[in-house]
Image (tube, helix red, strand yellow):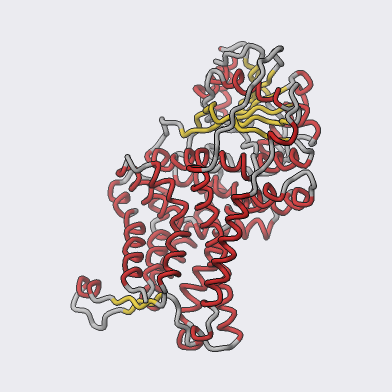
């Protein structure tokens, strides 16, 4: 056993130092200008409105810089580690867990069986409810004698409970265990290549393989949006390993059983992967990223299933921050870089609510309050009086902005930073890049209300559920979904009304996105007419950007 000490895991501080300094300087520079009394009359209500507006801007600037610095570091500063991996002198036993709940895929399970490593056993951890799927699993097990089936009577604790149940039964027989999701496709040398990493240091709790979008996605929606998978694993995970927090992603990884035992098993919560990773770090364990080993994974096949997954992510992040982050933050084994990275990453899943607050303030409160507070808000659209027709109406819209060039520049950089790697990586595929940008724009705007409600629901109930993306949706879930869709359409109509009454094109873009939700949920991207409609939010955003740039002071 080699022991390389802290050097193997030492975190570099330059990224977050640069990020925080750049953000702080920007806030100081612009906040002073935005608090200029020339923008409003001095009274409590106007100051409160401006304060909320500025705080939201500061928050969005921070995350804009976050994406900007991660992009720059991923292209120019992250170096691929070169490990001298010692050979395996013995072949430790490995349990390979294939987890499923009504989303069984034979090809994924077959990839688990085709490992070149010879000392492993595959276990199907089946929480399925659908009798047809259960029958398929049983037929598979009868065909392959080297596969064992484990089911539990009481399905508690979500995926974490499923794993814990298996490990409590057979964990003492295996030095390591690997986790596969229902859609994971493992390479044949997955176990063989990952196991030697554990010999680098006895404090390595898990080795995380790289993930890549499966080129055979199930739908047009998944084929377009699957690039998100590659984006995260190419530009964020490598940076996090060296400049932030390296987490176990819940699949496509091997875990040391001893480490699992020391932390008391997987926390039985919605975000068991993040909670488990932070508990490991508190015990001074580390994770390592084997970027040369790729597993395939699928993106949710429909927009509806993606919203379902987002529900799990947002509530899971809120639950983690409430229940597990405080002890992680106080732990002396964890560097401040890792602490801030975890907090920022988890917080990014909860941005919908402050974004909704920003919409309410910037698009409703401030415009309606101009005549009361004498607010000169940054953007003001003036409609033509008595236009002859629609074309005449569009041609004579005037844009009056109070933006300076420096303010326009920071808004442009921070709002687009998340898309820079998209443009760079897909520059040779312009048609696909445009399609991705169109769908990305729509999804970001169309999910703002449901994601906000998910967060609010967790705050009210303190409950987060592990909603399996491919699981059968039950009747109560349909009822909740329909209520949310109704609220989205209602809010979307109100946004359109605001476009007319407050002269704000931005609310038109948001309103259109929300109103399209029922159609996209029903038809996804299979309707040609609907596909054309989805271009509207994207091109209206471009138009708004051009109008603002032409009207700068």
Residue at the (61%, 18%) spot, across then down: 192
Q: Quadrant of residue 171?
A: top right
- Left or right of 104 in this view: 466: right
Residue 548: x and y in percent read 35, 70
Above/below status of 371 relative to 264? below
Above/below status of 177 relative to 507? above
> What is the count of numbered marks?
0
- Left or right of 465 in this view: 298: left
Q: Quadrant of the C terminus?
A: bottom left
Above/below status of 413 relative to 339? below
Q: Quadrant of the N terminus?
A: top right
Residue at the (71%, 29%) spot, across then down: 152
- Left or right of 336 in this view: 516: left
Residue at the (62%, 60%) spot, across then down: 456
Q: Quadrant of residue 469?
A: top right
Q: Quadrant of residue 82?
A: top right
Residue 405: x and y in percent read 40, 70
Residue 100 visible in the shown view: no
Above/below status of 137 relative to 474? above
- Left or right of 517 in this view: 148: right
Task: Decide which of 371, 76 is in the foreground and name it.
Answer: 76
Task: Decide which of 133, 36 is in the foreground and name it.
Answer: 36
């Amino acid at each position: 056993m080699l022991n390389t000490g802290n050097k193997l895991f030492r975190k570099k501080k330059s990224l977050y130092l640069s990020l925080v300094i750049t953000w702080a300087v920007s806030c100081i520079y612009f906040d002073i200008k935005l608090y200029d009394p020339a923008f409003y009359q001095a009274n409590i209500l106007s100051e409160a409105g401006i304060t909320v507006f500025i705080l939201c801007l500061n928050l969005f600037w921070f995350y804009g810089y976050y994406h900007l610095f991660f992009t720059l570091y991923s292209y120019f500063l992250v170096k691929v580690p070169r490990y001298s991996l010692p050979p395996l002198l013995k072949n430790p036993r490995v349990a390979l867990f294939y987890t499923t709940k009504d989303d069984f895929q034979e090809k994924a399970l077959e990839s688990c069986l085709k490992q070149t490593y010879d000392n492993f056993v595959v276990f199907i951890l089946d929480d399925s409810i659908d009798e047809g799927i259960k029958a398929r699993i049983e037929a598979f097990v009868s065909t392959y004698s080297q596969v064992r089936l484990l089911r539990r009577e009481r399905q508690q604790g979500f995926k974490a409970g499923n794993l814990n149940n298996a490990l409590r039964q057979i964990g003492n027989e295996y030095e390591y265990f690997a986790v596969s999701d229902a859609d994971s496709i493992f390479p044949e040398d997955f176990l063989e290549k990952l196991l030697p990493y554990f010999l680098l240091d006895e404090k390595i709790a898990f080795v995380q393989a790289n993930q890549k979008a499966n080129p055979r996605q199930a739908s047009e929606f998944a084929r377009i949006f699957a690039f998100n998978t590659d984006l995260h694993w190419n530009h964020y995970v490598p940076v996090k390993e060296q400049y932030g927090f390296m987490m176990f992603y819940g699949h496509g990884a091997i875990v040391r059983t001893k480490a699992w035992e020391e932390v008391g098993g997987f926390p039985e919560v919605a975000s068991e992967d993040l909670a488990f990773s932070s508990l490991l770090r508190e015990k001074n364990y580390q994770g390592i990223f084997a970027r040369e080993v790729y597993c395939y994974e699928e993106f949710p096949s429909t927009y509806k299933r993606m919203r379902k997954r987002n529900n799990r992510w947002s509530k899971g992040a809120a639950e983690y921050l409430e229940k597990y982050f405080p002890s992680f933050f106080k732990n002396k084994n964890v560097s401040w870089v890792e602490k801030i990275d975890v907090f920022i990453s988890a917080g990014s899943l909860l941005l919908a609510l402050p974004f909704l607050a920003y919409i309410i303030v910037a698009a409703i409160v401030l415009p309606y309050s101009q005549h009361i507070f004498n607010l000169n808000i940054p953007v003001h659209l003036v409609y033509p009086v008595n236009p002859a027709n629609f074309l005449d109406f569009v041609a004579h819209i005037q844009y009056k902005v109070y933006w300076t060039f420096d303010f326009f520049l920071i808004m442009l950089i921070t709002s687009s930073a998340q898309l820079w790697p998209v443009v760079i990586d897909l520059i040779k595929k312009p048609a696909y890049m445009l399609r991705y940008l169109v769908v990305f724009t729509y999804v970001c705007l169309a999910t703002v209300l449901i994601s906000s409600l998910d967060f609010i629901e967790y705050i009210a109930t303190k409950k987060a559920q592990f909603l399996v993306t491919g699981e059968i949706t039950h009747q109560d879930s349909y009822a909740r979904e329909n209520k949310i869709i109704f609220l989205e359409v209602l809010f979307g109509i109100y946004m359109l009304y605001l476009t007319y009454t407050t002269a704000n094109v931005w609310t038109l873009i948001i309103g259109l996105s929300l109103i399209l939700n029922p159609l996209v949920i029903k038809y996804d991207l299979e309707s040609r007419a609907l596909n054309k409609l989805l271009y509207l939010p994207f091109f209206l955003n471009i138009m708004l950007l051009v109008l603002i740039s032409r009207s700068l002071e």
